[in-house]
Image (spheres, rainbow, N blue to C red):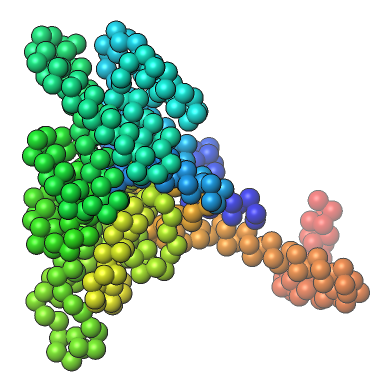
Amino acid sequence: LIFEWWYFRKYGTSFIEQVSVSHLRPLLGGVDNSSPNSSSSSSNGDADSSRQSVSECKVWRNPLNLFRGAEYNRYTWVTGREPLTYYDMNLSAQDHQTFFTCDSDHLRPADAIMQKAWRERNPQARITAAHEALDLEDCATAYILLAEEEATTIVEAEKLFKQALKIGESCYRRSQQLQHHGAQYEAQHRRDTNVLVYIKRRLAMCSRKLGRTREAVKMMRDLMKEFPLLSMFNIHENLLESLLELQNYADVQAVLAKYDGTSTSHLSLGGFVCVCRFSPEAASRRGLSTAEMNAVEAIHRAVEFNPHVPKYLLEMKSLILPPEHILKRGDSEAIAYTFFHLQHWKRVEGALNLLHCTWEGTFRMIPYPLEKGHLFYPYPVCTETADRELLPMFHEVSVYPKKELPFFILFTAGLCSFTAMLALLTHQFPELMGVFAKAFLSTLFAPLNFIMEKVESILPSSLWHQLTRI
């Protein structure tokens, strides 16, 4: 029973059921191998479904990710817990290698050291390598690494990013002039562009964290105008959060309308609710206004897209530090959104009230068992596994829809409990249980004895004697 329960909690399915379906059914002839065409088409279907599940469960870099040295590490010092998983940090290492390296790095000693540093697993080894690169020459990516991982405050990180900005801008201008001289120069220019955009975005985030929100908004707007094609950094989500801090809701709606295809849909929930004031008592008397109806519709849309968000916003579930990567429609995305936006919801009178009164109504409109969505495509089944990889072990991952306990777990639990009770009663009252056992067996075999008596009375005694001898 313990093993069956553990397997269900870890993998979301019954071990007995999985063994029965995967191994016993083929042995008992449950698989039809009548035609090779059907088998090839089924394999193609499996490939398509697996490809679809992979695309549904693709993880994205969190555009609002925290600083490792100044924020994540401080949490570790205080609590002794690691807020980031190895899987999450490994994805970040791959991102850094994609953004900050190119094939020509081996030609420059500092960049060659940094190319190895981004692949290094040990944080202290990465920091040491960054210092070695700076001893050779000024290197923008070395300053980036130190700002992200060695700086223990946002002020220190900002100083390091400003030093990186000077070097990054000069490298960008130099490679911009040479980008058409060959594929190598073009790759170097692409790398320098990524470095410059990353530095400017992180500087804007430093300004936002240090309370200079208007300055941060200006930096983000300028960055989006200068590099409109670099949507992979999702700078507009940083801009949205800063505009909400300034309570500039008209600009929030404009940004949401422009980036609706790439923005996480539940952000529109904050945009709509932030323009209305809600009181359940007043709404019951006069009915919902047009703005409140729009807000309710936005809530239903947002909750269907990510059903994990409301419990965090309503503080029905404990919040943790957001990971560096998020899964769209998953628990990790809900944590990242709530971590940065809960303060904006609390600031608006009636927003959380409206959410509390209406969010559960979403699930009545979604077809069960989720074979098709209402406003979006069906909720993917793979989010739980991906979120468990992204989120730390001490966090209880939010699961949607809630899995029902398989029959075999309930059967095993009942059988185990019944056997344990019988063993206990037999140990405590052996004579009484012996009487009960005899009475039970006699009752169980009573129909058989009755049939035997009837058979003996009908059949001739000689024939019955021969049968018993056989």
Split into 4 quadrants, where in the image is the N terminus? Answer: bottom right
Which of 341/419 is in front?
341
Which of 270/380 is in front?
270
Which of 108/285 is in front?
108
Q: How many marks?
A: 0
Which of 236/196 is in front?
196
Q: Quadrant of residue 361?
A: bottom left
Q: Is residue 428 above or below residue 406?
A: below
Q: Give percent across and percent down for residue 441.
A: 79, 70
Query: Horizontal placement of 442 versus 14: left or right?
Result: right
Query: Horizontal placement of 353 versus 216: left or right?
Result: right
**Residue drawn 63% across and 50% down?**
3
Q: Give percent across and percent down for residue 297.
A: 17, 68
Residue 188 visible somewhere in the drawing: yes
Q: Is residue 309 above or below residue 442?
A: above
Residue sitting farthest toward the bottom: 285
Residue 47 visible somewhere in the drawing: no
